[in-house]
Image (tube, rainbow, N blue to C red):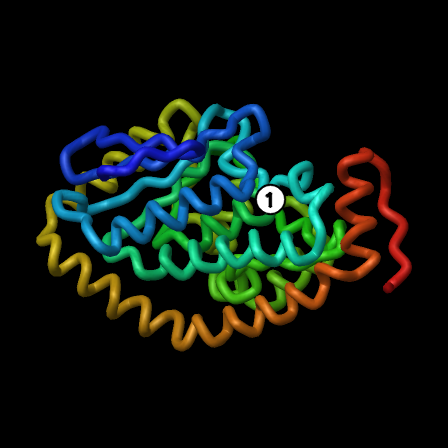
Amino acid sequence: MTESFATLEVTNPQPGILLVTLNRPLVRNALNSEMMSDLFRLWRELYVRCDGISCVILTGKGDKAFCAGADLKERNTIDTETWLQQHAVLEQAMGSMLDCPVPIIAAVNGAAFGGGLELVLACDFAYASSQASFAFPEAKIGIIPGAMGTQRFPEACGLRRAKELCFTGSSFTAAQACEWGIINKVCEPADLMQEVLSVASKIVSNAPLAVRQVKKALDVAGQPDIRSRYRYEIEAYSKLISTQDREEGTRSFNEKRPPVFTGK
């Protein structure tokens, strides 16, 4: 990689492996507009030029959170138009992540909520710390998942369970995530990165062109027409941004009080 990023740490821990660390630990690696832009640039550069890279590992800084989702403090003071403009960058980032030619493994080191869980689901597969936790809490603040979550989640854990978890906003453990097919393996916290590096090394040892081609083939088999389905999700998401309930949800989160929704 030739670029530097304000909110991402990008290193090469082993030949052929790119380690990308979400780096906003003071806010639990929450996604702000700068991180959305950084992720867009990262995936775009990997699509154009990934010589010498056969596998990407995505993780979060620290031992508390992989990514806590969108930065609602940043969003607390912005208008609808600015919100949608910021989200458009995230939409481009998620589309570019789809185009990444090499496997992406999530190393889920802590909480993965909202957009953080969507990043996990957008990876090719995931290992998680036994201390990790997961949730789609968007309905609690008047919005819905907007980074392919409504499309990826049912594919991972089944439609009925996805509905239950999205309707209630309930959190679940790493053990449950593994049982339900959302992650592949639960590791002890101290062993997580070594376990992920080990499986990444196995990928790197294989024929790189074969790995890229099998990723393409599997994506077509498992996720037909996901871009069209994502457009439907964004349409549903965007209709909520100008609602009073969305404003109340963001406000109540920042004021640390229960929201009072009116259905408007």
Question: In front: 116, or 165?
Answer: 116
> Does residue 262 appear in the picture of this structure?
yes
Q: How many marks?
A: 1
User: Which quarter of the rendered picture does the C terminus lie within?
Assistant: bottom right
Q: Position of residue 54 (x, y in %)?
A: 18, 47
What residue is shown at x 52% (from left), y 72% (from top)?
Answer: 231
| Residue at position x 66%, y 59% in the image | 144
Question: Taking the image as drawn, is residue 173 in sight?
Answer: no
Q: Is residue 101 left or right of residue 167?
A: left
Q: Residues within 10 Å of mark 1 (few under 14, many from 20)?
A: many
- Taking the image as shown, residue 24 lies to the left or right of residue 21, namely right
Q: Residue at x 87, y 63 (%)?
A: 263
Q: Residue at x 9, y 53 (%)?
A: 207
Can you give x and y, in whole percent of width and height, for residue 83 in the image?
Answer: 64, 53
Q: Is residue 230 left or right of residue 74?
A: left
Name the quadrant containing residue 193: top left
Q: Amino acid at mark 1?
A: Ala
Which residue in the protein does label 1 denote? 70
- Image coordinates for residue 55, horizontal then vertical, percent: 23, 45
Residue 2 vs residue 102, the one in the foreground: 2
73 up-or-down from 50: above or below: above
Q: Residue furthest left?
A: 207
**Does 189 sit left or right of 52 as displayed?**
right
Whether residue 149 is situated above or below residue 60 in the rendered picture: below
Q: Closest to the observer: 29 or 78?
A: 78
User: Does dot 1 land on a helix, a strand or a loop?
Assistant: loop
Instruction: Residue 104: give x, y in percent of width and height.
Output: 32, 49
Viewport quadrant of the N terminus: top left
